[in-house]
Image (cartoon, rainbow, N blue to C red):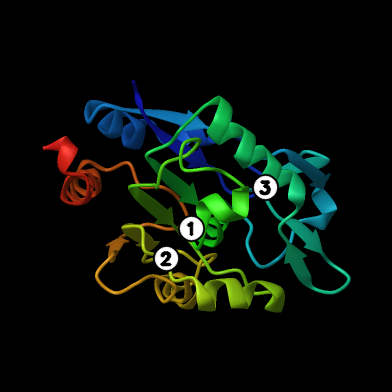
Amino acid sequence: MSRKILMLHGLAQSGEYFHSKTKGFRTELEKLGYTLYYATAPNKYPAADLPDYESDITTNSNEVLAWLENDAINKTYSLPQTTLNYIHDLCINEGPFEGIVGFSQGAGLAGYLATDFNGLLNLTVEQQPKLKFIIFVSGFRFKPEKYQLQYDEHLITIPTLHVQGELDTVSEPEKVQALLGCCEDGTKTHLMHSGGHFVPNSRGFLKKVTAWLKSVDPALE
């Protein structure tokens, strides 16, 4: 059975776009025996509704793909049921997954789900065994008040790697730190890179990622 990783793209991206931007990252993980599945958000929203809290790419399209639904009037956002249903079905039809790699909005989604992955997605342990790891690239904690109790009462216990760009002006340090604070002590690792708002593909950075994966997944040794 192949060892699968679920890849969650950023706002206004797609699975295909994310695939094209993570060639080096993908190649190194495939060398470890993983198969990467690039999901595409099921929700389309007018480009005019792009939120200003987190914009991953510039788009000329009239519609954008997103995991979250923006509420411009109330200056907030929410996690629609369509996203939960989609990830649930992916785990059953394309999984199970050993880990998740999320970028920006995809990392925010992965972080929230990690508080109780099977419970929030209504999955049994047989359908989706406990995840072995999650890699958050430019991640953040959901800000709306209605989500805070979930974070506060369910610390993330899965081993997590939090990747932050020194020049990232979209996912600022306080956003990354907020998600780090949702994780249990001893399970989280913080890794900086010298670039901005993207998934690094440099050899030096990827060596650090693969070393971390080997440290949390003994089966890779």
Circle 3: residue type: Leu
Name which residue lies at 76% across and 71% down: 76
Residue on which the image places disc 2: 156
On the image, the x and y values in percent for residue 133 come to: 34, 50
Question: Which label was assigned to residue 84?
Answer: 3
Quadrant location of residue 189? Answer: bottom left
Looking at the picture, tell me which residue is in the foreground, 201 or 220. 220
Where disc 3 sits, the SS reads helix
- State if disc 3 and disc 1 touch (CB < 8 Å): no
Quadrant of the image containing the N terminus:
top left
Asked whether the residues under the numbered discs 2 and 1 touch, taking CB atoms below 8 Å apart as contact, a structural biologist would say: yes
Q: Residue furthest right?
A: 73
* Tag 2: amino acid: Ile
Name the residue nearer the viewer: 124 or 192. Answer: 124
Residue 66 visible, this angle: no
Under circle 2, the secondary element is loop
